[in-house]
Amino acid sequence: MRLSGADRAAATGPSRPRLPVPPRALAGPSDPAGPRTQAEVFAAVLGAGPMSRGQVAQRLGVSASTVTKAVNPLVREGYLCEGGGTSSGPGRPVRLLSVNQDRHVVVGVKLAPTRVTGVVTDMAARVLARVDRPVRRTTPADLLGVAGEVVRAVLGAVPDSPARVLGVGVGIGGHVDAAGGACRYSALLGWRDVDVAVPLVAATGLPVVVNNDVNALAVAERWFGAGRDVDSFAVVTVGVGIGCGLLLGGELFVGTGGMAGELGHLPLVADGPRCTCGSRGCLEAVASGPAVLRGIQDRCGRRCGSLGAAVDLARAGQGAAGVAAREAFAVAGDALGRGLAALCNLLNLGRIILSGEGVVAYDLIGPALIGALRRHAFSTAARDCEILVDAVNDDAWARGAACLVIHDAVVRSVR
């Protein structure tokens, strides 16, 4: 779905690298031929290629010499290839750059309370194989043990992948220290200060990069999805919790300690419901899937076993139960709209991508969300912001984690 200006809606061989550089270590615009430009060149060729070096320079608004400095290591390391060509007149044909999609593969893993999902993708983040394993307990030993099994199993499903694999990306819901490869806090998993990278490196023998799962989605949207044509946007996920990933000025923004974007823990309702973080009245406590289920039960005593059941009740339910379900979704939508207004007021974003399993109920939360966004956004902040709706499944979360590895491998080739 698309809401333009919050108004319009419509349904929508080389050696293996060392531990990848975390996204927050990337160089800024002051380093025109550095890691950031390296990543943007790769993304441009991936999204619009095959294309010439001159076309890349024009697309990115940089000099031809800057593109050449960025392209050469990408070609040398096998991430891009250059060949073929076109000619519209006399002279030597222009050589075209394209992504060497089959040279390498990467693994993406999504850790969730009830399952571990793993995918193998090529360098264009196309899923080649997937493995899904249930988990009984969320202790670090149990969950990371299953994650190691999933990595081995999914690599075994793709011929020759062990010889071509660049590394493993892991997405976790919560506060993740990407530089340290650790989960500092996840209410969803019940983790505090859990080392993730080191045990998985030991179990798989592969480089491992770890980040917040919504940050991983944001990188995927920037390179392969709805964020390709904008430099600054947010991905806001709605489901068991409320997550947020920020791409600002073309770079993933994670803050000082790696926890930027914790929109779900914006204090919204004084003395409101208890949140998983221990506080009261957080946005997550009043707008997530569990909040909707609790709201239905509080209103009419009806217990819905899943968000899908609640959606069905709200769309087709009659009598008090149907009314209660529709009211619960509207309350959640209003709260989410106020949260998005705060995000727009702070950052004046041009685009917010709503994602996660909860956005299947957008028809139920959308009207209240847009109303609250308009009421609480300052000046033109709501009109400035385009809202896109893009539901994802577990494969998409894991694919986003794979994108972290692709991103960091491309960045590392400049060093």
Image (cartoon, grey):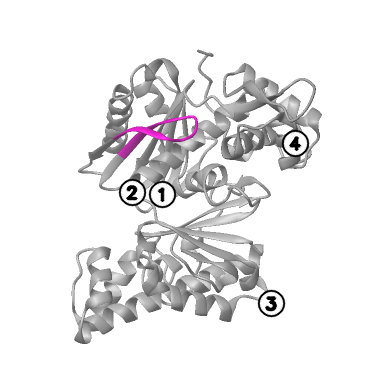
Q: Are marks 2 and 1 in contact (CB under 8 Å)?
A: yes
Residue 62 lies in quadrant: top right
- In the rendering, at what x and y percent does residue 140 appear? 32, 38
SS for tag 1? loop
| Earlier residue among tags 4 and 2 | 4
User: What is the C-alpha distance between the residues marked 1 and 3?
Assistant: 33 Å
User: What is the C-alpha distance between the residues marked 3 and 4?
Assistant: 36 Å
Residue kind at label 4, given as amino acid type: Ala
In the image, what residue occupies the spot 39% across and 78% down?
331
User: What is the C-alpha distance between the residues marked 4 and 1?
Assistant: 37 Å
User: What is the C-alpha distance between the residues marked 4 and 2?
Assistant: 44 Å
Q: Is residue 128 magenta?
A: yes
| Foreground of the two, 348 or 124 | 124
| Foreground of the two, 201 or 257 | 201
| Earlier residue among tags 2 and 3 | 2
**What residue would you read off at disc 3?**
379
- In the rendering, at what x and y percent does residue 219 appear? 54, 44
| Earlier residue among tags 3 and 4 | 4
- In the rendering, at what x and y percent does residue 153 appear? 27, 26
Q: Which is in the foreground here, disc 2 or disc 1?
A: 1
**Residue span colored magenta:** 117-130
Side (left or right) of 222 relative to 364: right
SS for tag 3? loop
Residue kind at label 2, given as amino acid type: Leu
User: What is the C-alpha distance between the residues marked 2 and 1?
Assistant: 8 Å
Rendered image: mark on residue 189: 2
In the image, what residue occupies the spot 77% across and 42% down?
61
SS for tag 2? loop
- In the rendering, at what x and y percent does residue 300 appear? 21, 82
**What residue would you read off at disc 1?**
173
